Structures are given as structure tokens and as C-alpha cells.
Image (cartoon, rainbow, N blue to C red):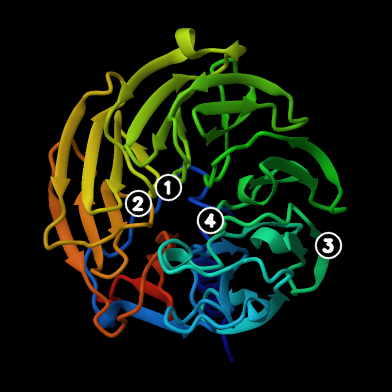
């Protein structure tokens, strides 16, 4: 017979394994700390020996995985725009939400949303670079929330049953759609700039509109919520020419600041009440003190730097701002002064980088589209720690890496990988 002590030991081990796997829920785009994680046991170098599991995906996508209660949620698309040479017919577009078991990579369920319009036309210079599933889901105890551009925002329960659908606008843009939904209290908040030039808050239980702000122009970035210098919650996003801040509860405008006069893809990051906005084809970075009222351009803009990124978002660590320019150059700037600390081109050449970096245990993980992942020390002196390639996968990697237990999730157009430290490490 098993002893009581033995049975208690087994229960303790099982509980610890379960707790370890779900130790840090990554429930929205870039997690809860703007691309930083408290995890420490991610592999710095990896090969096929580090692949705990890999799951074949039904189709490509640029969205990142999110994690909740032992489940991974991820989007992809099929039917249209997969083959650049023969994109097919717009009405054949299908977007998919997958639920995947975190412990073994098995697909639990899959839900499909069909096209609502033939106007979502494919092009080989913009949409082809990221596709029709670029928005990362958001998840909490109430369910899973996805944004599929002109098809709308959708709510599912954790068993895959659709609860509601909300139309965010029917317009289309040559660049496609890309901003991700975020959750705040009982709200789902969506930047629907390409679809209706709107920022929309939806009750996540009923699917009813709660508030809306208009004139959200040329904005592809995901809104962020942070605590301002007055101790209150604020929501901010970058639009053409400005950073805008709102009360996330009721949508009332709080302040605006002149910023980057172009379309904006990267999301803002915040630290100690200071916002750092980055973006534009001319690559600009702006630091703004939060908590103002009205036009705060003269009073709250701290510095502006003529370096930046058109696509990836930055991350903050130990008084420095780090980011990658999509053409394979990585940067470090002093957040207090705006002084450029370093500017280095990755070698071997990275090609394009669209993913935003993950900060973990003093290292930055930069994922290139076709040339692997570069691990760079998060310090004021540039140091390439390692360069890792998934040699068996020649597809495109657009998604951000996401921490999971003693490893991380890495998504390509073909597979979702769970990479861990080798058990002998």
C-alpha cells in the first residue's frame, strides 16, 4: 500500500508542476508589464533538443499567444492571402481562434470566423507582410476576446462558445488591421482606427458599447493602461501627430501632446508615470510626463529623439529604453535624458524584425522574421549573447515571444513552439 507521506508527495509534485506551468499568466499583447517578465529560467541558447512540443497551425498569422489557466489562445487565418502569387478570393478568408493545452501543445478547440466583405483586398507590399490575423487575443476569467478587423470584435467562453460579436467598422486599409484588444475592469477596449477611426469600449459581458472616441487617425498601435503621476489610471495611444490620454472607465479625454507626425504601429510603454512613444517612417521617440490636462505639449513633453522604429515596440529596463528598428538595428537610450547610448546592427544580418522584444532575466529576445532570434544583454553596452535559428522551419516569425514556465512560446507561420531549458541544465 502507498504510504500517506508518499501520496502527499505525489500531490505536492503535481500541484507544483501545475503551478509552475501557469506561474505567470500572459493575458494580453506584451503581457502586463510592457514586454517584461519576471521569469528567470528561459533558455538563452536552443536547438531541437529544447523543443518540448510543437504544434502545427492551420494557417499563418502575426498575432502572439496569450495564456490563461493552463490554456494558450492564438489566432491564424486561411483561405485568402496565404499564397502571395495566388491570393484567391476575399470572401474565402477565414480567421481562426485556437485553444491549445499548455502542457502538451494539443489543440483543444478551434473556432472560425468567415469574411464579411469582399473589400478586404490583398496586396503584396503591406498586408502580405503580416496577414489577416495580426491582433493578439486578450483573456481573463470571463472569456477570450479577439479583434478581427472589419469582421469585428468577438467574445468566446473558455469552452469555445461564442458569446457576442461587435461590429467595429467596415472600412479597410491597405496596411490591414493589427491593434490588439485590452481589458479593463468590465470593458474590452479596441483601437479600430483602420475600420472606423474610433477607440471603442465594449462591455465584456454583454457586448454593448459603453463609450467611443473618434478621430483616432493613422493608428495601428495597441492602447496601454498605466498609473499616472497623480495615482490615477489612464489609457493612452499614439495617433497621427499626437499622443492621446483618456479615462479608461468612461472614455473622457484627459490630455493630448504633440508627438509623431505619421502613422503609428508601435505601442507606448510607461514607467514611473512617464510615457515613451515611438514610431513613424522617420523613426522618432518621444518622452511625455503623464497626468496633465488639455494640451500638455509645452509643459509635459520631456524630450524627443530622432531615432525610433516603424514596427516593433520598445521595452524599459534599469533606466534605459531598448528597441529594434525593423531593418535589423537595435538601440539603447537613456530614459532620463533621451541620450542615445548605442546603435548597433545585428550580425549575422537579421533581415526584417517585426516582433517586439521580450525582456527576461537581464536579456532581450529579438525575433527576426527569417533569420532567427537574437539574445542581447539588457545593458548600456551592446553584447550579443546568442543567435538561435529554428533550422527545420523556413517560414516567417512575426510574433512576440511569450514566457511559459521554464521556457517560452515562439510562433511562426507554420508552428507554435514551446522551448524549454534541457532537463539536464
Residue 335 vs 374, above or below: the answer is: above
Q: Earlier in the sequence, mark 4 or mark 1?
A: 4
Residue 297 coordinates in the image, percent (x, y): 48, 13
Name the residue located 56 percent from the left edge and 67 percent from the top edge.
Answer: 133
Do the residues bearing badges 4 and 1 touch, measured as CB atoms within 8 Å?
no
Do the residues bearing badges 2 and 4 touch, measured as CB atoms within 8 Å?
no
Residue 8 coordinates in the image, percent (x, y): 57, 73
Name the residue tied to disc 3: 164
Q: CA distance from mark 1 to mark 2?
A: 7 Å
Residue 8 in sight? no
Residue 27 coordinates in the image, percent (x, y): 58, 55
Name the residue tied to disc 1: 35
Q: CA distance from mark 4 to mark 1?
A: 10 Å
Using a 10 Å C-alpha cutoff, classify the residue at mark 2 as few (fewer than 14 neighbours), some (14 to 19) or many (20 or more). Answer: many
Name the residue tied to disc 2: 357
Judged by depth in the image, the label closer to the viewer, 1 or 3, is 3
Residue 403 in sight? yes
Q: Secondary structure at mark 4?
A: loop
Name the residue located 34 percent from the left edge and 18 percent from the top edge.
Answer: 303
Left or right: where does residue 401 sit relative to residue 210? left
Using a 10 Å C-alpha cutoff, classify the residue at mark 1 as few (fewer than 14 neighbours), some (14 to 19) or many (20 or more). Answer: many
Left or right: where does residue 355 sit relative to residue 297? left
Residue 354 coordinates in the image, percent (x, y): 37, 57
Residue 287 vs 378, above or below: the answer is: above
Q: Earlier in the sequence, mark 3 or mark 4?
A: 4
Q: Earlier in the sequence, mark 1 or mark 2?
A: 1
Q: Secondary structure at mark 3?
A: strand
Q: CA distance from mark 3 to mark 2?
A: 33 Å
The C terminus lies in which quarter of the figure? bottom left
Name the residue tied to disc 4: 26
Amino acid at each position: 500500500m502507498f504510504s500517506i507521506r508518499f501520496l502527499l508527495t505525489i500531490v505536492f509534485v503535481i500541484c507544483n508542476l501545475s503551478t509552475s506551468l501557469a506561474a505567470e499568466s500572459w493575458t494580453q499583447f506584451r503581457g502586463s508589464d510592457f514586454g517584461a517578465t519576471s521569469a528567470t529560467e528561459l533558455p538563452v541558447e536552443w536547438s531541437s533538443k529544447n523543443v518540448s512540443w510543437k504544434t502545427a497551425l492551420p494557417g499563418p498569422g502575426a498575432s502572439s499567444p496569450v495564456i490563461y489557466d493552463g490554456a494558450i489562445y492564438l489566432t491564424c487565418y486561411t483561405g485568402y492571402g496565404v499564397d502571395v502569387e495566388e491570393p484567391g478570393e476575399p470572401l474565402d478568408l477565414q480567421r481562426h481562434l485556437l485553444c491549445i493545452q499548455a502542457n502538451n501543445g494539443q489543440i483543444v478547440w478551434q473556432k472560425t470566423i468567415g469574411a464579411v466583405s469582399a473589400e478586404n483586398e490583398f496586396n503584396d507590399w503591406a498586408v502580405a507582410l503580416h496577414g489577416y490575423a495580426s491582433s493578439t487575443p486578450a483573456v481573463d476569467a470571463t472569456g477570450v476576446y479577439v479583434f478581427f478587423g472589419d469582421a469585428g470584435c468577438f467574445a468566446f467562453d473558455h469552452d469555445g462558445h461564442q458569446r457576442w460579436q461587435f461590429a467595429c467598422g467596415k472600412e479597410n486599409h491597405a496596411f490591414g488591421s493589427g491593434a490588439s484588444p485590452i481589458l479593463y475592469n468590465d470593458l474590452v477596449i479596441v483601437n479600430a482606427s483602420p475600420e472606423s477611426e474610433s477607440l471603442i469600449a465594449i462591455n465584456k459581458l454583454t457586448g454593448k458599447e459603453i463609450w467611443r472616441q473618434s478621430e483616432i487617425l493613422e493608428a495601428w498601435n495597441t492602447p496601454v493602461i498605466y498609473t499616472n503621476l497623480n495615482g490615477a489610471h489612464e489609457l493612452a495611444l499614439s495617433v497621427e501627430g499626437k499622443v492621446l490620454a483618456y479615462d479608461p472607465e468612461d472614455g473622457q479625454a484627459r490630455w493630448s501632446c504633440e508627438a509623431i507626425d505619421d502613422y503609428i504601429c508601435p505601442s507606448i510603454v510607461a514607467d514611473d508615470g512617464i510615457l515613451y512613444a515611438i514610431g513613424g517612417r522617420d523613426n522618432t521617440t518621444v518622452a511625455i510626463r503623464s497626468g496633465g490636462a488639455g494640451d500638455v505639449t509645452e509643459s509635459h513633453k520631456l524630450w524627443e529623439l530622432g531615432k525610433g522604429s516603424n514596427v516593433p515596440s520598445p521595452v524599459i529596463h534599469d533606466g534605459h529604453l531598448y528597441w529594434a528598428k525593423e531593418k535589423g538595428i537595435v538601440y539603447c537610450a537613456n530614459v532620463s535624458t533621451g541620450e542615445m547610448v548605442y546603435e548597433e546592427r545585428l550580425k549575422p544580418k537579421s533581415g526584417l524584425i517585426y516582433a517586439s522584444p521580450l525582456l527576461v532575466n537581464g536579456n532581450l529576445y529579438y525575433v527576426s522574421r527569417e533569420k532567427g532570434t537574437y539574445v542581447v544583454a539588457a545593458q548600456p553596452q551592446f553584447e550579443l549573447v546568442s543567435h538561435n535559428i529554428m533550422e527545420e522551419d523556413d517560414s516567417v516569425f512575426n510574433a512576440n515571444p511569450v514566457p511559459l514556465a521554464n521556457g517560452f512560446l515562439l510562433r511562426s507561420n507554420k508552428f507554435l513552439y514551446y522551448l524549454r531549458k534541457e532537463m539536464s541544465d
